Image (tube, rainbow, N blue to C red):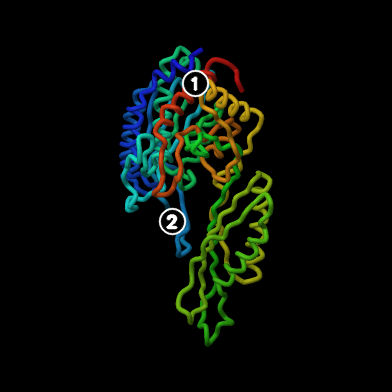
């Protein structure tokens, strides 16, 4: 069985920092297909040092509703998959994402050294640093005798920041039959605390089509889509409960002041804390929309739904958390966990019945803002942690 100090000696911290800075210097906002392609090529080159086959997988089709109420296709970048020892009896899944929330025209584009232990830059923590942790953890692990005992898939998608809609099927396919999974979102807190149980999330676009009319001459002949949308907002908010929040976010539609508007698009988000709440809401929404169409004499179309189910932590997943904690203790890292209101690909993996710890990435903070930072020593720290966890999962039946 590999020892913690042996693993630490194999980690090249300086190379990890260089790679993280290089990858963060390439803009890979979810909508920047050229930038995503550049990052994917760079990642494929770096991960080719590991045994196994690399594939760039085409994104699944994804549609959205535009401001005119039309269903339009959304383009996404390709997803990277590395498969190592696919015939092994015990196989793991490691996941990350190459996209960031910063589009190509955002002013936050460069990496700067704040001090000897901190860098500031787009995607440094979320999650170019996490991708580097995956690579170097696996590199260190492959140098051990335990590596041949297990196989693993690595999946790095291009659309996590917008819900993984074009990679959800790929995640489910790769998660199927896996013994355990590790996802490399940054730690929940800068001290390395892990995210434990998570709620879910769903995004909806409701298109309402009424009938236009002159606001002065014959308003009674119109069917005001904006009024119907406003009424739907009020009805939706009444469905909020202790186990689900509902956030009406935007209404689009309308035209001149003297025209009864015949189109409105309502966009809202839900955060169910349990599978029961998620399923209950679907039925309630269907009833609301049917009643609204009847009451207001409008046509109603719903698009979207829950994209990430709630992620409870069962007994097997708890054992994985405890294994990570124990490996951290061996390395002198104090690791705890707490519930999180955020979501990630860990939700999707857990929904497949696979135990997952989804904040195995770097320590840092202020993600999704120009103040995003990465704590430099955490690159090597977390790579050593993952390598040790992989060794334990390979050397015995821990879950």
The residue that label 1 is drawn on is: 388
* Front: mark 2 or 1: 1
Residue 179 shows up from this direction: no
Name the residue rendered at 44%, 33% in the picture.
155
| Image quadrant assignment for residue 228 | bottom right
Question: Could you say where residue 258 lies in the image, as x and y percent from the top left?
Answer: 48, 82
Q: Earlier in the sequence, mark 2 or mark 1?
A: 2
- Determine whether, in the image, residue 227 is placed left or right of residue 51: right
Question: Which part of the image, by quadrant, shows the C terminus?
Answer: top right
* Residue density around tag 2, few if under 14, some if 14–19, many if 20 or more, within 10 Å: few
Q: Looking at this view, is 185 or 327 the one in front?
A: 327
Name the residue rendered at 31%, 34% in the picture.
42
The residue that label 2 is drawn on is: 72
Q: Looking at this view, is 293 or 391 the one in front?
A: 391
| Image quadrant assignment for residue 26 | top left
Name the residue rendered at 47%, 40% in the picture.
167
- Say above or below: 189 vs 68: above
Q: Looking at this view, is 337 or 76 the one in front?
A: 337
Under circle 2, the secondary element is strand
Q: Which mark is residue 195?
A: none
Residue 329 shows up from this direction: yes
Question: Could you say where residue 216 lies in the image, as x and y percent from the top left?
Answer: 52, 86
- Determine whether, in the image, residue 70 is placed left or right of residue 305: left
Do tag 2 and tag 1 residues touch (Cβ < 8 Å)?
no
Name the residue rendered at 62%, 68% in the picture.
231
| Image quadrant assignment for residue 247 | bottom right
Question: Could you say where residue 381 lies in the image, as x and y percent from the top left?
Answer: 45, 27
Question: Could you say where residue 4 lies in the image, as x and y percent from the top left?
Answer: 48, 18
How much space separates mark 2 and mark 1, taking CA atoms? 46 Å
* Residue density around tag 1, few if under 14, some if 14–19, many if 20 or more, within 10 Å: many
């Amino acid at each position: 069985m590999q020892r913690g100090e042996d693993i630490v000696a194999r980690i090249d911290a300086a190379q990890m920092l260089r790679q993280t800075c290089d990858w963060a210097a390439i803009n890979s906002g979810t909508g920047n297909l050229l930038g995503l392609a550049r990052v994917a090529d760079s990642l494929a080159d770096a991960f080719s040092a590991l045994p196994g086959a690399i594939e760039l997988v085409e994104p699944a089709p994804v549609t959205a509703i535009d401001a005119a109420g039309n269903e339009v296709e959304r383009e996404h970048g390709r997803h990277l998959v590395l498969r190592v020892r696919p015939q092994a009896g015990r196989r793991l899944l490691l996941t990350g994402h190459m996209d960031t929330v910063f589009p190509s025209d955002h002013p936050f584009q460069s990496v700067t050294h704040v001090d000897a232990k901190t860098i500031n830059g787009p995607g440094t923590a979320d999650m170019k640093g996490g991708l580097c942790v995956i690579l170097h953890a696996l590199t260190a692990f492959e140098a051990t005798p335990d590596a041949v005992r297990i196989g693993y898939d690595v999946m790095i998608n291009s659309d996590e920041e917008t819900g993984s809609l074009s990679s959800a099927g790929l995640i489910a396919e790769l998660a199927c039959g896996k013994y355990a999974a590790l996802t490399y979102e940054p730690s929940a807190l800068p001290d390395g605390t892990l995210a434990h149980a998570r709620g879910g999330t769903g995004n909806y676009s409701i298109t309402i089509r009424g009938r236009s009319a002159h606001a002065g001459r014959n308003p009674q002949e119109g069917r005001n889509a904006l009024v119907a949308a406003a009424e739907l907002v009020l009805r939706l908010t009444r469905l909020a409960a202790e186990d689900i929040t509902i956030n009406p976010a935007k209404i689009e539609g309308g035209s001149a002041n003297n025209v009864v508007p015949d189109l409105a698009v309502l966009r809202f988000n839900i955060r169910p804390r349990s599978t029961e709440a998620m399923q209950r809401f679907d039925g309630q929404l269907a009833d609301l929309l049917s009643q609204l169409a009847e009451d207001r004499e409008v046509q109603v179309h719903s698009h979207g739904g829950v994209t990430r189910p709630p992620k409870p932590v069962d007994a097997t997943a708890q054992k994985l958390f405890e294994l990570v904690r124990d490996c951290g203790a061996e390395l002198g890292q104090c690791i705890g966990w707490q519930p999180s209101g955020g979501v990630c690909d860990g939700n999707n993996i857990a929904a497949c019945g696979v135990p997952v710890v989804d904040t195995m990435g770097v320590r840092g903070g202020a993600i999704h803002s120009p103040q995003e930072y990465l704590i430099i020593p955490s690159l090597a720290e977390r790579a050593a942690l993952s390598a040790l966890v992989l060794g334990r999962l390979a050397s015995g039946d821990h879950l």
